[in-house]
Image (cartoon, rainbow, N blue to C red):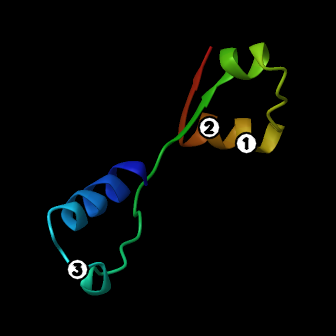
Amino acid sequence: MGVLTGKMAGQILKGKNPATTPVKRVTSYETVINQKAADELNIHIPNQVLQAAHKKGRIIK
């Protein structure tokens, strides 16, 4: 989502009219969890989110 948003923002900064910019949706994604950072910040990641990252994404340890 961030890359797509950045591309759209770039087009607008180059002069494209925001009103004529079509709405776009992300069609593929990856769930990425930085477990090390979460642990350092004392943030608990729910099991359901961890399972999603195992299925379609990755966990940074």
Cβ–Cβ below 8 Å for labels 1 and 2? yes
- Please tell me how crowded label 1 is: few (under 14), some (14-19), or many (20+) other residues with Cα within 10 Å: few
Q: Amino acid at mark 2?
A: Ala
- In the rendered structure, the answer to whether residue 1 lies left or right of residue 32 reads left
Mark carried by residue 49: 1
Mark carried by residue 3: none
- For disc 3, the marked residue is 17
Give percent across and percent down for residue 42.
84, 20
Q: Amino acid at mark 3?
A: Asn
The quarter of the rendered structure image containing the N terminus is bottom left
Q: Secondary structure at mark 3?
A: loop
Spatial CA distance of label 1 from label 3 is 37 Å
Check the image and report above or below for 50 versus 23: above
Q: Residue at x 79, y 33 (%)?
A: 45
Q: Residue at x 30, y 78 (%)?
A: 18
Residue pushed farthest left?
A: 14
Cβ–Cβ below 8 Å for labels 2 and 3? no
Q: Secondary structure at mark 1?
A: helix
- In the rendered structure, the answer to whether residue 6 lies left or right of residue 25 reads left
Give percent across and percent down for residue 9.
30, 60
- For disc 2, the marked residue is 53
Cβ–Cβ below 8 Å for labels 1 and 3? no
Q: Amino acid at mark 1?
A: Val
